[in-house]
Image (cartoon, rainbow, N blue to C red):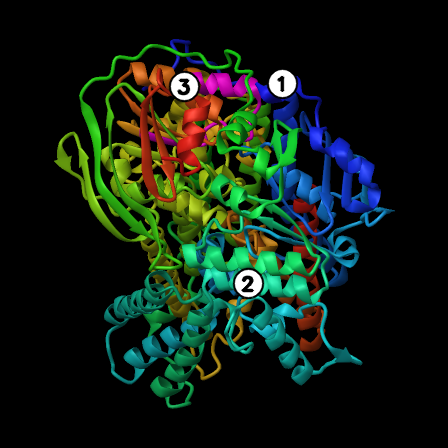
Amino acid sequence: MENVNSKAVVQPQNSPGGNWRSRLRINVRQYTMIIALLLVWSIFTVLTKGIFISTRNLSNLFLQSATVAVIACTMVLVMVAGHIDLSAGSAVGFTGAVVATLITKAGWPTLLAIPVTLLLGLVIGVFQGYWVAYVGVPAFIVTLAGQLIMRGGILGVSGGNTISPNSELFRQFGQGYLPQLVFKGAGFNDFSALIGILAVILYNVSALRSRRGRIKHGFAVSSPRNQMFKQVIISVVIALVFSIMVFYRGIPYAILIVMAMVLIFSFVSQNMTFGRYVYAIGGNKDAAQLSGINVKKTNFLIFVLQGLAIAIGGIVYTSRLNAATGGAGSGMELDVIAACIIGGTSTMGGEGTVFGAIIGALVMASLDNGMSLMNLGVVYQYVVKGIVLLIAVAVDVSTRRKQ
Amino acid sequence: MVAGTRPVGCAIPSEIWKVKGMDDYILQMNHITKEFPGVKALNDVSFNVKRGEIHALVGENGAGKSTLMKVLAGVYPFGSYTGEMIYNGEELQFAGTRSSEKAGIAIIFQELALVKQMTIRENIYLGNEFQKNGIIDWDTTFVAASKLLDEVHLSRNPLIKVIDLGVGEQQLVEIAKAVSKKASMLILDEPTAALTETETDNLMQILRDLQAKGVSCIYISHKLSEVAQIADRVTILRDGRAVATDDVKNMTEQRMINLMVGHEITQRFPRVDHTPGETVLEIKDWTVYDPDVPTRKVIDGVSFSVRKGEILGIAGLMGAGRTELAMSIFGSYGVGRTGELLLNGKKMVANSPSACIDKGVAYLSEDRKRYGFVAMMDLRGNMTLASMEQLWKNGIIDGNEEIRRTEQYVGDLSIKTPSVEQKVGNLSGGNQQKVVVGKWLMTHPKVLFLDEPTRGIDVGAKIEIYNIMNQLVEQGVCIVMISSELPEILGISDRILVMHMGRLVGDLSWKEGTQEKVMYLATGGK
């Protein structure tokens, strides 16, 4: 049935009018998040008389957002499929308490404690995924139960005490920076600079390759001038982001982890059948089911991945604070969920991007960071974050209605 | 034939009644015309109901019965249609369903409108509570509800939740609710579709009781034997026109069928001669139970076979079990399935859509919005959704290859879209349908079930779908087409199966198939 009609293959009907409009609409949504982030940054820069925009502060800001960003990568999948995970914060605290206890009290080597903790994350994911996918208990309930159970687990493991893992290696995950490579006395981190340059090169190579692929298949591509313009802009942005860290103390290991997670889960969500199934289930579960998609298995896998990401988040979080406390991670799930929503993930499922969620995480971290710099109390931080979340969803709802 | 010669909406006996005076009518709907974009759903329909009569309204699916009743119930408010309605001598201008209720008109839809988690008592008086300052007087409610349940012969405690009642009992609760509102006119839309014989008899008795109390009733049904049994008069609708109104005693079932079907069939259907080959799919003694009511047989011992290179049409009225038959074969409906499926002579065990797709069986749903496409996903994602496992075995999608394949089908099926990255929710109905058809073609099916493939799309797109079907058959695909449009079934199928109440009641070649014959079998004739 390759040829239902004898008609020749029709070329892409890219009528510029309709396409231009729909493309603009999609892009407006993506750009509003970036514009909102830049707006927040500008405001804080002015209000803090430039302290906010310093490489030192922005590097710290990235580091502060790392845990939320790591978990946001998979929380997007959870939410796109129409679920929610309220246990993320407790699970971060729990995995953190376990890894700290293993290193400090049990005296395990860090390189053994970490894989075991990741395994624990998988087990948490398997457990919650089983109830959601195969028993059919709503994720809201399953993860609310998980939140309580793991909150208890934290106290059980730590005995209510604060545990500081005394491992230099472990501390690197949340506090360490890439070392200087060759130029020991330089005013910048050469290793990080190298990675930054590689990132720019890699981006440009892949952009050109994708363009060549499209041309080979006879698809419409943007004009060489537009393509070059776009590549230059994005290259500059990548270079700027890296230079923030290059000119401070280098790229933190935690940020390398975030970058790896973003790349992996962007690929999973856009280029893998599994990712496509997640969007299909969130968009129309009945149609997905009838298209032969194994809805249960897909839902199960989503939670397994979420569990893994949470364990990574727990390690980074505990390492950065160098302490596992009884209250660790409490309320963090709401920061993660807010990051996803501010980044354009639909609360009804079916829509959302990993990249957007990372921008959302940066917005949330920027609000925290900026208001701390201004010495505003916690009172304001909570109120402002709440208002931002409300406005983000209101904007989302009203633009959706117009379509 | 009879209809063609008679003026629209004006039957002979009405002349006689006019002499008796207007007061005889509780309801007069005069020259009602209701248009939807591109379709005249009602075309100058005049329809009268006498005080205290049971008036049956019959017609094929899509003839305009539901639209007419929605006008009467205020679902389509005054101003959205033309014509006038006079009820009890006063002109009606409804703003919504609430105002029709006030006027004393109660409509009971096929999909019952009860709150399942609430008790019978709460449901009957929902929105109409015995209350003072917002505080409900439950005792009075209980006594009143018990009395109403007696009236409708439902011996149940009013404190039972509606969810624990059978479909027939739920319907009685609805009727009790209508009675509680002192409705002077009751409209029943296919009330017996899900009822057992005893329940049907009970319902008939209740309607006669109500009639004796002066309540008028409009009774919509596909079951002509019932109509003959209960109604005083009958009006027949066809293509949005009232083609006849007459006393039931002057109407034979055959005459009703003739009037329902009408007689203008033009060549809207590109028939191509097919030469059927060997049997591909065989269904033996297929029985399926309702997942909601596991004691109710939805499909009852159905056996048939589909041969290579033929279009097999399945005809039947709403609720005959056609969709359930197809979906149960596709592994996505029903409990307690028994019987055998043979694909190319080999026993096929397929309990899920994915297993069926693997083996080359595909099912296009009648409800494309709910089961067909993902509205916020782009065209390309929708088209490849069912064939991803076949296309990308390692789980990684080749984006360019995906676009290339999608564009090929977009071209072959002439889907009109600005790009393959367009969200399917933004396309027209016909193009959405083609996207779903494309999705199934991409799975390379051997047997393709098409459930109402042309529902809700315009005539041009319909013909394109027929042409695609003919080409597929030439390529050796078997097509099973379920359709409620008789002309379509007769115009396209090579062979026609007729279903009635979960059973297969007819197997005709297209040459022996006529609308009358099919309608006769589909309404339970033997």
- How crowded is the residue under tag 1: few (<14 C-alpha within 10 Å), some, or many (20+)? few
Please state which of residues B185 and B177 is positioned toward the viewer in this rendering.
B185
Q: CA distance from mark 3 to mark 2?
A: 41 Å
Mark 3 Cα shell of 10 Å, populated few (<14), some (14-19), many (≥20): many
Quadrant into which the C terminus of chain A falls: top right
**Would you say B166 lies left or right of A52 here?**
left
Disc 3: host chain: B
Could you give the CA–CA distance between mark 1 and mark 3, rounded to whole angstroms?
26 Å
Marked residue chain, label 1:
B
Which amino acid, mark 3?
Answer: Ile
Report whether A233 appears left or right of B98: left
The residue under the point 59% across, 38% down is B248
Query: Does the CB distance between marks 3 and 2 fall below 8 Å?
Result: no
**Residue B1: x percent and y percent?**
57, 18
**Tag nearer the camera, 1 or 3:** 1
Nearer-N-terminus badge (1/3): 1
> Which residue is at a point 82% across and 46% down the rendered structure image?
B23
Q: Which label belongs to residue B172?
A: 2
Front-most of residues B430 and A284? B430
Does residue B212 appear in the picture of this structure? Answer: yes
Going from N to C along the chain, the mark reached first, 3 or 2, is: 2
Q: Mark 2 or mark 1, which has the lower sequence index?
A: 1
Query: On screen, A90 above or below A392?
Result: below
The residue where tag 1 is placed is: B4
> What amino acid type is highlighted by mark number 2?
Leu
Q: Is residue B398 magenta?
A: no
Q: Nearer the viewer, residue B190 or B385?
A: B190
Region of the chain picked out in magenta, as a range:
B448-466
